[in-house]
Image (cartoon, rainbow, N blue to C red):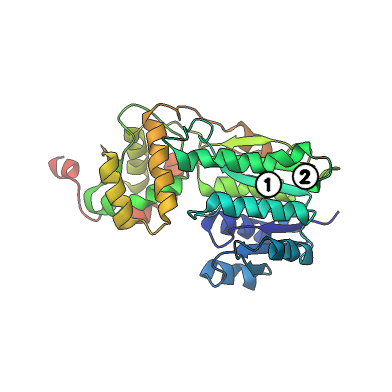
């Protein structure tokens, strides 16, 4: 059984990490015949690196569905990993990709969605809620017996990426603070992006009678980190990792918006997504962990917050003593 994988938004960090795992880990690469990456920015360093290691990079031009169908057919794509891009037209681009995959006869589809989208309200958290619309596009194929794409779907609802906390390294280094607009009491469970990539790689490399491994086919996998954290608990985990006192600062949404505008080199739609997720935390809608799928798929435990912060301790370590240290 061949497995020719196409990964969308491969020029983004999620797509890059999934492709990286499939290429370098023997347990995955031996199951994969080819990897094609669709890229909105095909000249990016990530694309150049993956290309040098054997992946085929194809420019993605939204708005040309017929050309996308032809591309998928030419590369022999039988499995597609759909990663909604960090783009203001995320839903339209993803809808077009799914329609092209249907027409190209792609059999297996893995969608990387977002945990919390089911709790989001369309008026208050539209960027989060649009993942429900994207899931509907993917899963609607299941009810159409004439569409190959409906035979073997899988959805991973990824939790809040812990890497988003690195957007506040400036405050961590200069002030010894972690400023987040999440309130004082409610919690959430950040997940390491590498953990999501690991689950995705397992699904994409898994094989069964009808496409994906029967343990994965048709699954809705919610994957968060293993520890519920309020702001103070996140700061404590960061303090342990960097060996210096870090403090949580509960900031307003207005201030959070200013910080993201000044420091975050990400698409505006992603900034809106982050602010909406923080509002979900404040509403108490993220007070849960979901690690069963991660454990069942990988046989391992997801990354603890302290372990994550240790991996990035050099980026977070304060460059001067905090007030707490001075007064000690």
Mark 2 or mark 1: whose residue is earlier in sequence: 1
Question: Which residue occupies 79% across, 49% down?
Answer: 107
Vertical comparison of 103 with 66: above or below = above
Give coordinates of residue 15: x percent, y percent.
59, 56
Question: Which residue occupies 54% across, 67% down?
Answer: 41
Quadrant assignment, res 217: top right
Callout 1 crowding tier (Cα within 10 Å): few <14, some 14–19, many ≥20: many
Side of 198 where 215 appears, left or right: right
Point out which mark residue 212 bears.
2
Side of 125 where 90 appears, left or right: right
The answer to whether marks 2 and 1 mark residues whose Cβ atoms lie closer than 8 Å is: yes
Classify the position of the C terminus by image quarter.
top left
Give coordinates of residue 213: x percent, y percent.
78, 42
Side of 212 where 16 appears, left or right: left
Give coordinates of residue 118: x percent, y percent.
54, 32
**Mark 2: secondary structure:** loop
**Mark 1: secondary structure:** strand
Residue highlighted by disc 1: 110
């Amino acid at each position: 059984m061949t497995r020719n994988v196409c990964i969308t938004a491969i020029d983004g960090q999620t797509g890059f990490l999934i492709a990286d795992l499939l290429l370098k880990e023997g347990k995955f690469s031996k199951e994969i015949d080819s990897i094609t990456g669709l890229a909105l920015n095909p000249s990016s360093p990530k694309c150049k690196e993956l290309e040098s290691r054997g992946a085929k990079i194809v420019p993605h031009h939204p708005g040309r569905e017929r050309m996308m169908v032809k591309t998928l057919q030419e590369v022999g794509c039988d499995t597609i990993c759909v990663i909604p891009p960090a783009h203001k037209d995320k839903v339209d681009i993803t809808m077009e990709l799914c329609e092209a995959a249907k027409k190209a006869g792609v059999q297996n589809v893995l969608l990387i969605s977002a945990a919390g989208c089911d709790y989001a309200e369309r008026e208050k958290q539209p960027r989060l809620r649009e993942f429900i619309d994207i899931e509907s596009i993917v899963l609607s194929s299941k009810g159409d017996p004439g569409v190959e794409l409906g035979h073997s779907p899988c959805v991973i609802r990824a939790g809040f990426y812990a890497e988003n906390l690195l957007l506040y390294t400036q405050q961590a280094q200069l002030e010894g603070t972690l400023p987040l607009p999440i309130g004082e009491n409610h919690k959430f469970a950040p997940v390491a992006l590498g953990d999501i990539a690991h689950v995705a790689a397992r699904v994409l490399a898994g094989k069964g009678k009808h496409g994906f491994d029967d343990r994965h086919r048709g699954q809705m996998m919610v994957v968060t980190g293993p520890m519920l954290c309020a702001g103070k608990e996140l700061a404590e985990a960061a303090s342990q990792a960097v060996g210096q006192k870090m403090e949580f600062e509960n900031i307003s949404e207005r201030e959070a918006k200013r910080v993201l505008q000044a420091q975050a080199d990400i698409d505006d739609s992603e900034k809106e997504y982050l602010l909406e997720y923080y509002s979900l935390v404040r509403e108490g809608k993220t007070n849960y962990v979901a690690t069963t799928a991660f454990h069942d798929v990988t046989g391992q435990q997801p990354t603890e917050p302290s372990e994550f912060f240790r991996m990035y301790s050099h980026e977070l370590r304060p460059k001067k003593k905090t007030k707490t240290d001075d007064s000690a």
